[in-house]
Amino acid sequence: MSLSRKILLCAVAIALSALFVRLGFWQIDRHGERSAGLRGRAERAEAPRLEWTRPGDVPPDTAGLIGRRARLIGRWDRAAEVVLRSRTLDGRAGAELLTPFLVGGESGPVVMVLRGWLPAPDGLRPDLAAAWTDPPSAPATPIRRLGSRVFVSSRDGRGGQPLRVEIAGRAHLAIAGLDLALIREETALDPTPHVLRADDPPPDAALGPARAVETDAGPHLSYAIQWFSFAVIALGGTAILLRSSSIGRAPPGGKASSGSKTS
């Protein structure tokens, strides 16, 4: 291998290793941010419960609310339930229910509540009536107290392709994730930026628990170790390649030939 090629190979290896190390530290930073967010959420969970009983009680944003618990008074809007499609529970196909709750009554602000999971063989059309203990008598149910609920992030990826599915003679929006902007576009609802996760239902209820709120810092540390490993492999592999090239190269010239033998 020529000297110029060796220099080029070393430069590429060093550049790649520097990139891998930078990506490793980026994952460490993300781990720290995620851990700090989880600690803040745990602290907020111990704060006094919020009471939203009138329309004016609902704040305009979610600042400092992720992880807080709340008690609401108002009405469910069962007719406008949104289906979060293709969600599994214990290996079973199903969907989760995102139900509007009108704080304070019929004209109150709309808060979306992730109520739980229902089985659905196609992951799209659960039996929504099974999630209620009383039959729907009107588009909005009577005034109710909504017990302790915990705030979750409304940024659960994109909602994907919106679908309209007919369930028990009524059309419902079915989306792939918590996407409040898509709900505003596809329905007459104007939800606040808050999403609440309902407390887990009783074990014998038809409605299963919704996804649990994440309590771990994610795989960022393992990703960081992978990037650091790539950096070591890039430098070590280059060193081995250069050494192999040097060893395999024959020395210049050969053994001096002896003069011809004279008698």
Image (cartoon, rainbow, N blue to C red):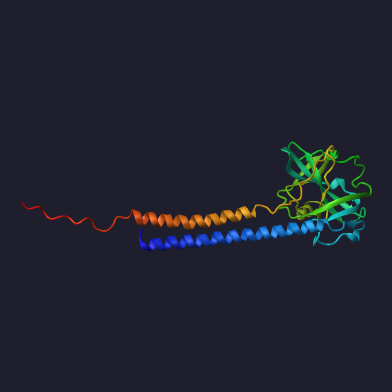
Q: Nearer the viewer, residue 261 or 229?
A: 261
Position of residue 122 in the picture relative to residue 249 (left or right): right
| Residue reaching furthest to the front | 263
* Quadrant assignment, res 21: bottom right
* Quadrant assignment, res 49: bottom right
Where in the figure is residue 151, as x and y percent of width and height? Answer: 81, 54
| Residue reaching furthest to the right | 143
Q: Residue at x 36, y 63 (%)?
A: 3
Residue 11 appears anywhere in the view: yes
Q: Nearer the viewer, residue 13 or 145?
A: 13
Which quadrant is home to the N terminus? bottom left
Where in the figure is residue 218, as x and y percent of width and height? Answer: 68, 52
Q: Residue at x 35, y 55 (%)?
A: 247
Where in the figure is residue 258, as x and y percent of width and height? Answer: 15, 55
Residue 192 appears anywhere in the view: no
Where in the figure is residue 257, as x and y percent of width and height? Answer: 17, 55
Up the image or down, 213 lies above or below 37; here it is above
Up the image or down, 243 lies above or below 129; here it is below
Q: Residue at x 50, y 62 (%)?
A: 15
* Quadrant assignment, res 29: bottom right
Position of residue 203 in the picture relative to residue 11 (left or right): right
Q: Nearer the viewer, residue 194 or 129?
A: 194
Position of residue 258 in the picture relative to residue 86 (left or right): left
| Residue reaching furthest to the left | 263
